[in-house]
Every structure is written in C-alpha cells, then in structure tokens.
Image (cartoon, grey):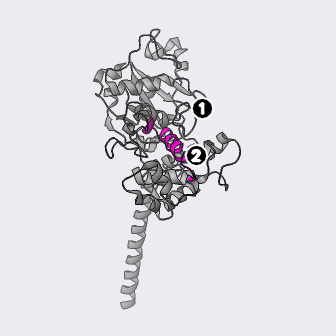
Amino acid sequence: MRRSRSRVAVLVAVAVWLAASTTLFTGVAMVAVAGGALAGGCAGDGGPGGGARQLGDRAWSAEQTDNAQTIVQVVVSRQLPRRAAVVAVSTAIVESQLRNVSHGHADSLGLFQQRPSQGWGPPETVLNPALATATFLDRLVAVPDWATMAPGTAAQTVQRSAYPQRYAPAEQAAAALVTYLWPGPGEVAAGDPRAAASATLRCADQGAADVAPARAVEDAPSRGGAPGSPQRVAKDRVPPGFTLPADPRQRAAVGYAISKIGRPYVWGAKGPDTFDCSGLMTAAWAAAGVPVPAGTVTQKTAGSPVDVSRVAPGDLLLVPGSLGSPRNPRHVGMYIGHGLVIDAHDSRSGVIVSPLSAWIPRIVTVRHIAGPSGAPAARAA
C-alpha cells in the first residue's frame, strides 16, 4: 500500500510538472508570437539593428539597437575608425539610453541631447538620429587627438557636460554594441563606404508595403473616381489643389514628407536623401520638432491610438507589410490629408503617394502623433 501511494504521489508530481512546463513553454511561445520581450531578433521584433537582444550584461530593445546601428552606419559611411562609433554610442547611452527623446535639460533633444540654442542645429537635425550623429561626429573629429584620449574624455570634450564622469563607465556596453554591428574585423571598414554601411544592417529588409501602388489604381478607370480624386492619384505627386494642414506641426511633418516624394527607399535609412518606411516617419516629424522613435516595432506604440475614422494629417498608419503580421506590423505610412498616404514604399518605388482606400483594409493601428485629431468624415475621403 505504501508503495502504491508513493507511486501515485510521484505520478501526480510528474503530471503537475508537465502541466507547469507546458504552460510555461506555451506562454513563451505566445509572447514570442506577440512580439514581446522574448521575441527579439530578425524572426521577432527585428529591425536594422537586429531587434531586441542581450549583449554581455546589458539587454537592449529593438529601438536601442536600431539607433546604435544608425550611429555605426554613419561612422562607417564616413570611413572613420571604430573608436568614433564607440565614443558616439557611449555618449548616446549616457544622454538618452539610445532613445530619440523629447525631453532633457533646458532645450536638449534627441539621442545626444543636443541643444538647438547652443548651435547644434534645428530640431529637424537633432531629432533625426542620422543627422544628429553626423553633427556629433563633425565636432568629435575636430578635437585634436580625440582617438587617443582616455575613456570618456573625447565624449566630454564634445558634450561639455556638467557630469563628465558619466561617459567612461558606458564605454564597455558601447563597445559590445559596436562590435556586434561593425562590418568586419578592421578598425576602419574596408571597401566601398556604401557597401560597408549596408553591412551594418543586422536583419534583412522586412518593411515592403504590400499595398497596391497608386499608379495601378490611377490606370484603372473602371474602378471609379473622377480625375484628380484620391482613387486615381498619381504616385509621384500630390494632386492639384492639395492643401497642407492648418496645424503648424502637422503642416511641417506633412510638408517634409511631400518634399521627399520620389526619393529612393533604402533599408535602415533616415534621410536626408534616402529613407525606409519608419525612417521617413522619424525624419518628417523631426522637421516639426516632434520626436518619433526609430523602427516600426516602436512606432506601432508611438503617440496615441485613434480609430481610422478619425485619422488626421501626420498620423502613422501601421500595416503588416510583406513579412509582418497583424500582431507585428512591419510597414508604416503617413496620412497627409485629402484621402492620401505617403510612404517609403519599397526599393522599386521609393517614396510615393497612395490612396487611403488602398491602405484601410490592411491597417493594424493608427497612431496620432501631434495636433488635432481628424473628423469622422475623414474616412469617407
């Protein structure tokens, strides 16, 4: 009897363990599918920087690796030594935790907490991670012997912080990120700068729109819509009579996006001449002095959610794209008013205009960034 009871106890214990294990692993799988903290990397929340990951004793989000990749890419494209990337990344870790933020001391903004009032450039520059990095590097390389300075000294020479002791402790974490992103073993990336810069990308392009290009709609009169209507708009221009929104921030963001129609699509690019889908959103809102985080994985929670029936100019429209899903949208465009959307569509089309009607069936979420929300009638356009 004792043996039977013991066996029953063991079987019960095993059954409980199996049930708990199944629940645990199912929970992990569900988090991974949902794009949560355990879904880092190119198969989960991947972006140009490779998505969320652990490097050494530090865990980085997809947004942080995306911004680190941008910094390294700019350094490589300028054929500067690896040390420049370490100094720049360590500075961004200290100043913003590698996030494109809107707050800081006085008028400090962005990755490096650069101050427009102190000659760092307008918000359009300091809130664009690529342009902010270029500005930081301009000042860094102007410092004599910067590459041989003690840890943290070069960063302090550029930043002139009231807390200079903060920079050196961040260098180890910065070096791990740079090692992960750096293309090749050399101190300076060899070969064509553009090819070397592309080699800093840690995931394949996951952002193609998978929305019918506007030209296909324009060339199909049987689908209806009077000439010049949103249903028949050309992809390479806004229609005659288009007006910018009245709100100054929405006007600046939409105006910037429109000025980039026809520019090439390049995975990971944030301007000023090439863009990927999320990079165009970040750059356009930077022109309005409003920070938008890098990457669709973060932009899907930027601002506040609104129903598509109340979409307003400047709102971000997230769709699954060719490789995403409703839970993990990987493409984003901007509603610009008049029933139109602008996006960095794909490598074949570049930045184009499309009708909102082509996007609506695929929209996962609409994110309102700034300015007044739209009227319910906006959807009818």
Instruction: Give the residue type that dot 1 points to.
Output: Ser
Q: Quadrant of residue 304?
A: top left
* First in residue order: circle 2 vs circle 1: 2
Instruction: Say which of 127 and 107 sits in front.
Output: 107
Q: Is residue 232 above or below residue 283?
A: above
What is the x, y in percent for residue 359? 44, 28
Residue most toward the right?
191
Residue most toward the top?
227
- Magenta residue check for 129: yes
Q: Which mark is residue 75?
A: 2
At horizontal 37% and vertical 40% (from top left) the residue drawn is 302
Q: Which mark lies nearer to you, 2 or 1?
A: 2
Q: Is residue 362 above or below residue 181?
A: above
Q: Is residue 328 visible?
A: no
Residue most toward the bottom?
2
Q: Is residue 239 above or below residue 11?
A: above
Q: In the figure, is residue 102 to the left or right of 42?
A: left
Image quarter hosting the N terminus:
bottom left
Image quarter hosting the C terminus:
top left
Q: Badge 1 is on which residue?
A: 347
Residue bounds of the magenta highlight: 125-145
Q: Residues within 10 Å of mark 1 (few under 14, many from 20)?
A: some
What is the x, y in percent for residue 77? 61, 42
At horizontal 53% and vertical 19% (from top left) the residue drawn is 236
Instruction: Give the residue type that dot 2 points to.
Output: Val
Q: Which mark is residue 19?
A: none
What is the x, y in percent for residue 115? 38, 41
Q: Main secondary structure of the magenta part?
A: helix
Q: Is residue 162 visible?
A: yes
Mark 1 element type = loop
